[in-house]
Amino acid sequence: MRAWEVAEPGPIEGELLRLVEKPVPAPGPDELLVHVRACGVCRTDLHVSEGDLPVRRPGVTPGHEVVGVVAGTGGAVSGFAPGDRVGVAWLRRTDGTCGYCERGAENLCPASEYTGWDADGGYAEYTTVPAAFAYRLPEGVDDVALAPLLCAGIIGYRALRRAALPPGGRLGLYGFGGSAHLCAQLALAQGATVHVLTRDPAARRLALALGAASARGAYDEPPEPLDSAILFAPVGDLVPVALRALDRGGVLSVAGIHLSDVPPLRYESDLFYEKELRSVTSNTREDGREFLALAARHGIRATTHVYPLERAREALRDLKAGRFDGAAVLVNDRPPQS
């Protein structure tokens, strides 16, 4: 099968992410073999490819926003059959027994594993996933539209929850890529006023088209104090900027897995008046199930740009350069191997 692998982490402008031939993986006893039909392109894939995240698996195949069909099952699997459409997301496995898992915080499990980082992901014709971590997908939505929901959508949902937005509140979104434009749709559907702050003019236009009340530059002040804010851009310099934009008692949620260094904070101007700064770590499966149900209910859709699988390196370069709004999706047009 065709698959991309990170030969050696480094700038995506080089040739260190390469397309190779690999054997079709064999599913473990509790796993599904999935024929990949679409895979979203996430900024985390860029962090894995460029080495912002430490190497967990040499030569790993990135990708964790996978929509595909079951092509085989391990001997211990029940409830899935060949031909079922499933989603494969970032969180791949947890131990299920630690204190975090037992209290419903499996995203904090010290033994957690991740698709496209600890195990080969969806920039390939096939991948595997533990059956317990595969998502059943709603009918009536095509593969390309669904793919970004499986990480960008889910992590945006968790970030929104962590931001503790009050009903009808004022939400600021810093950065407006794949995750933020899905989060904005959910917040708007739930009655929030959304202000977008991003450097990209095309993203600002998309934000306004989706219903944002305003769209300004990343370092600009929003037109009114914010009850909550989410930082999607991996730019630590924006942390004090966003904190200063909060109203008293406001919460800033930092959504990314990687963030450049945060400058010193000034207590009086940045954190006083009971403002809060919160991080976001992965998601739980319950987050995923809740978000997919909400996305179906509210008709949340990704703005997508399609690339064939063989152009994955180009898609990541375009993501890094900000050449598209919304989300990129890789499409595998080869039928399953017989």
Image (tube, rainbow, N blue to C red):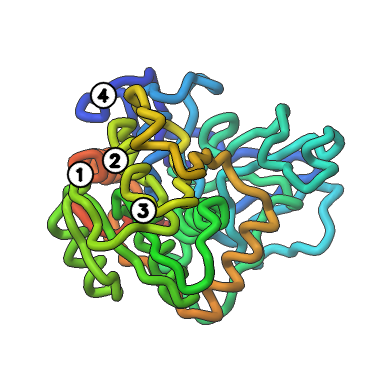
Residue plotted at (57% across, 73% down) = 294
Which residue carries the number 4 mark?
11
Quick one: label 2, few (<14), some, or many (20+) residues within 10 Å? some
Question: Is tag 2's residue or tag 3's residue first in the polypeptide sequence?
Answer: 2
Which residue carries the number 1 mark?
219
Q: Position of residue 45 (x, y in %)?
A: 41, 37
Q: Which amino acid is tagged 1? A: Tyr
Q: Nearer the viewer, mark 4 or mark 1?
A: 1
- Left or right side of 45 for 95: right
- Separation of residues labelled 2 and 3 (CA atoms): 34 Å
Q: Tell me if label 2 and label 1 are in contact, CB under 8 Å.
A: yes
Q: Which amino acid is tagged 3? A: Leu
Question: Is 92 drawn above or below residue 166 in the view shown?
Answer: above
Q: Which mark is residue 230?
A: none
Front residue of 306/149: it is 149
Q: Quadrant of residue 243?
A: top left
Q: Tell me if label 4 and label 1 are in contact, CB under 8 Å.
A: no
Q: Which mark is residue 241?
A: 2
Question: Is 146 drawn above or below residue 190 in the view shown?
Answer: above
